[in-house]
Image (cartoon, rainbow, N blue to C red):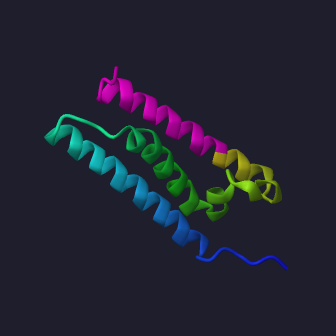
Amino acid sequence: MPAGPPLPPRAVALLVLTVGVVGLAYNEWRAETAHEILLIALFCAPTATRLGLFGLIEPRVVWALGPQRRALPGGVRVAGIAALVLGVLASVWLAFGRYHVG
């Protein structure tokens, strides 16, 4: 029998959400004080935020993009892909609408 995750699934979702929010807040603070942004935070934090939010509703969504996705129901995989797409769209909006990168 395979071992379960080392942390409860909602705790992992909350951790992912926290990392995303902290990344967004740090990037915003950095943009206002030093007039520069971190691209890694710009592109990863919105996706982590969406994945964490979706994961608080359905904890299996956090693993929907990983190697164990084939064992999950189709709806959970669709929710994981939706979180990924929404995060990428939010990153594009932040890059070109908020921070005017390029």
Residue depicted at 74% across the width and 50% down the height: 75
The residue that appears at 48% across and 65% down in the rendered structure is 14
| Total numbered badges shown on the rendered structure | 0
The C terminus appears in which quarter of the rendering?
top left
Q: In the image, which residues are magenta?
A: 81-102
Q: Position of residue 46 (x, y in %)?
A: 44, 44
Tell me where residue 30 appears, x and y as whole percent. 22, 43
* Relative height, residue 59 to residue 44 (above, below): below
The residue drawn where x is 74% and y is 55% is 67
Whether residue 46 is situated above or below residue 17 in the rendered picture: above
Q: Is residue 16 above or below residue 88?
A: below
- 77 vs 20, left or right, is right
Where residue 71 appears, x then y in whole percent? 82, 59
Q: Residue furthest top?
A: 102
Residue 86: x and y in percent read: 53, 38
Magenta part, dominant SS = helix
Furthest residue toward left: 33
Query: Residue 100: within the magenta?
Result: yes
Q: Quadrant of the N terminus?
A: bottom right
Q: Nearer the viewer, residue 68 or 89?
A: 68
Q: Residue furthest right?
A: 1
**Relative to 31, 72 lies left or right:** right
Q: Is residue 82 magenta?
A: yes
Residue at left offset 45%, top offset 39% = 43
Q: Is residue 29 above or below residue 18?
A: above
